[in-house]
């Protein structure tokens, strides 16, 4: 089963990471209805304060670079 999963991402950690990021974006978009609940909304707002956004962007960039470096030298 693991070879099939790896094949679905073309054995690329970068493609896997891109799909994870896209899926999280989709879940956030769909979860907008859930955010109508004041308890959930306040918890999300606490975690996603604007002062933390630069750190999220830095983390996403670092993970993306690490994923790309992992496979950058494998193609000849």
Image (cartoon, grey):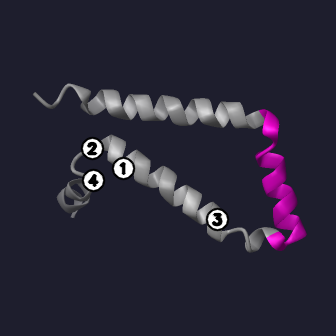
Sequence-first tag of 3 and 1: 1
Inter-mark Cα distance, 1 to 2: 6 Å
**Residue 22, image x, y percentages:** 49, 55
Category of crowding for the residue at label 2, using alpha-carbon neighbours closer than 10 angstroms: few (below 14), some (14–19), many (at least 20): some
In the rendered structure, which segment of residues is drawn in magenta? 36-51
Q: Quadrant of the N terminus?
A: bottom left
Residue sticking out furthest to the left = 76
**Residue 13, image x, y percentages:** 32, 42
Q: Are marks 1 and 2 in contact (CB under 8 Å)?
A: yes
Q: Is residue 34 left or right of residue 14?
A: right
Q: Would you name the residue on which mark 1 appears? A: 16
**Residue 58, image x, y percentages:** 59, 29
**Residue 14, image x, y percentages:** 35, 41
Q: Would you name the residue on which mark 2 appears? A: 12
Q: Which residue occupies 47% across, 34% down?
A: 63
Q: Are marks 2 and 4 in contact (CB under 8 Å)?
A: yes
Sequence-first tag of 1 and 4: 4
Q: Would you say residue 10 sits in the magenta stretch?
A: no
Q: Which mark is residue 9?
A: 4
Inter-mark Cα distance, 2 to 4: 6 Å
Q: Which residue occupies 14% across, 31% down?
A: 75
Inter-mark Cα distance, 1 to 4: 6 Å
Q: Which residue occupies 81% across, 42% down?
A: 49
Q: Are marks 1 and 4 in contact (CB under 8 Å)?
A: yes
Q: Would you name the residue on which mark 3 appears? A: 29
Q: Which mark is residue 65?
A: none
């Amino acid at each position: 089963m693991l070879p099939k999963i790896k094949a679905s991402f073309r054995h690329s950690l970068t493609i896997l990471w891109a799909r994870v990021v896209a899926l999280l974006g989709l879940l956030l978009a769909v979860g907008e209805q859930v955010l109508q609940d004041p308890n959930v909304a306040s918890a999300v707002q606490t975690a996603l304060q604007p002062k933390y956004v630069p750190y999220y962007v830095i983390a996403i960039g670092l993970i993306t670079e690490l994923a790309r470096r992992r496979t950058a030298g494998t193609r000849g």
